[in-house]
Image: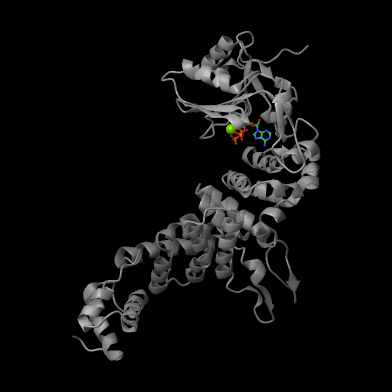
Amino acid sequence: MQQTPVYTQALSDPVFRIIAKASQNLNVSSYVIGGYVRDYLLERNTSKEMDIDVVVIGSGIELAKEVAKLLPGKPKVSIFKNFGTAMIKSSGWELEFVGARKESYQKDSRKPAVEEGTLKDDQNRRDFTINALALSLSEKDFGSLLDPFNGIEDLNAKLIRTPLDPDITYSDDPLRMLRAIRFATQLNFKIEKESLEAIKRNKNRIKIISKERIVTELNKILLAQKPSIGFALLLKVGLLDYILPELTALQGVDEKDGQRHKDNFWHTLEVVDNIAETTDNLWLRWAALLHDIGKAPTKRFDKDTGWTFHSHEFVGSKMVYKLFKRLRMPLNDKMKLVQKLVLLSSRPIAISNDVTDSAVRRLIFDAGDSIEDLMLLCEADITTKNPRKFRTYHNNFKRVRKKIKEVEERDHVRNFQPPVSGEEIMHFYGIGPSREVGIIKEAIKEAILEGVIPNEKDAAMEFMQTKGAEIGLTPA
Ligand code: ATP
Ligand code: MG
């Protein structure tokens, strides 16, 4: 018989001895299970590997209370009675305690009926074999691995596999379909063929999953090193159409009169992977994912100019709002950033061939503090396979960046504050709030952006007087 491997090294932190002692005091067996064990074995240092899940043959709540007594500073125990779980935060760890359970599911809900069970029962209800690995916290076999489904083999083979029949696992809790794809993306694992087929068969079950949970998984996919793995899988199994139909609509290449356009779906995935190399900002990654969604509804063929996507940036930025709303994502400044980046996504390209001061001033004025993010998005948007073009486009953007720096240092139009205020205009002419004040303000702003006058008070006052005379105003 094969010997059980022992991983005491994984449990070298004092907190594990304390949980072991508490378990001994209560005369129960307990185990570390799930993500902590998996990530230890993968030598994966996530920024938050601070999650420890403990399963106990008995009451999770009672064990948590006993552990808290033994921990330095006697931390508070948060009890979730409905779930029979308890949580303690202590010295950077988040400890979750749950009693081993056996679950059975009804068709229309992912909330199972629960009864007490053995460790094996509990491992059975886990989503994947690599997430069912458990290390014993008992005195007699401290650190022994309990791996009834050969999760270790799957870890080595980089395989996502379910402990039970995948059709049952996914149908019981369809969130697991997204978790499978998320883990495949984060860990760069393959999803076992039977699992993939089962996901295809069960995809419409995703409807019972809340939007919030879907978005949590989408965000994790987007934050992975290579997000395209996840989106390609979502497309392949047919889930993307339920979640982000705006993206599936970008698929395909049309040809007319010998003219073809690029496949905007695969292009988009390349852009997302590119931006993932330069930023961890989730919202910039969302912007990359959505930057071309306006292309599906705006696609036209014109005999003279070929394929066009006229004003797809504007249409796309409107779609961002609807998409965020549908997925119950925050409709706050993050959403506005994504909208803004989508709206402006073609501007740096449009000016990069012939960079004039006034075009750059307008760009800075419109982008404000998002100018750097916008440049990152545009650089990520370069997906040409032609090395000469690739270099040219990047060099063009280098010139745009240089110009942005020069112009901003000189003209300060980022977060533009008019050098002459509405108050000052009204005072000068002895008039109240009126259309004329707006006209003059707008004219001053335009003159500065166009480079007719510098962004300075004296010049703006002088310009105001010329403009004022033009529209028939006389100084007070
Ligand atoms: P991460 O924390 O990186 O998301 P994790 O594996 O720790 O990964 P959690 O969501 O923290 O994931 O869940 C902890 C453990 O609980 C998992 O390892 C798995 O064993 C189990 N689990 C979580 N969600 C499910 C689910 N929907 N179905 C079955 N088991 C689950
Ligand atoms: Mg976890």
The quarter of the rendered structure image containing the C terminus is bottom left
- Whether residue 13 appears in this view of the structure is no
In this view, the residue farthest toward the front is: 82
Q: Residue at x 75, y 25 (%)?
A: 149
Colour scheme employed for the rendering of this structure: one colour
- Whether residue 418 appears in this view of the structure is yes
Vertical relation: 305 (above or below) 65: below
Image quadrant assignment for residue 249: bottom right
Relative side of 191 to 415, left or right: right
Relative side of 418 to 172, left or right: left
In this view, the residue farthest toward the top is: 140
Q: Give residue 147's position: percent from left, percent from top.
A: 71, 22
Q: Nearer the viewer, residue 303 or 36?
A: 36
Q: Give residue 168's position: percent from left, percent from top.
A: 79, 37
Q: Give residue 464's position: percent from left, percent from top.
A: 26, 82
Q: Residue at x 73, y 24 (%)?
A: 121
Image quadrant assignment for residue 294: bottom right
Image quadrant assignment for residue 417: bottom left
Q: Residue at x 39, y 68 (%)?
A: 365
Q: Give residue 420's position: percent from left, percent from top.
A: 26, 74
Q: Nearer the viewer, residue 242 or 156?
A: 242
Ligand 2 rendered quadrant: top right
Vertical relation: 253 (above or below) 226: below
In this view, the residue farthest toward the left is: 476
The quarter of the rendered structure image containing the N terminus is top right
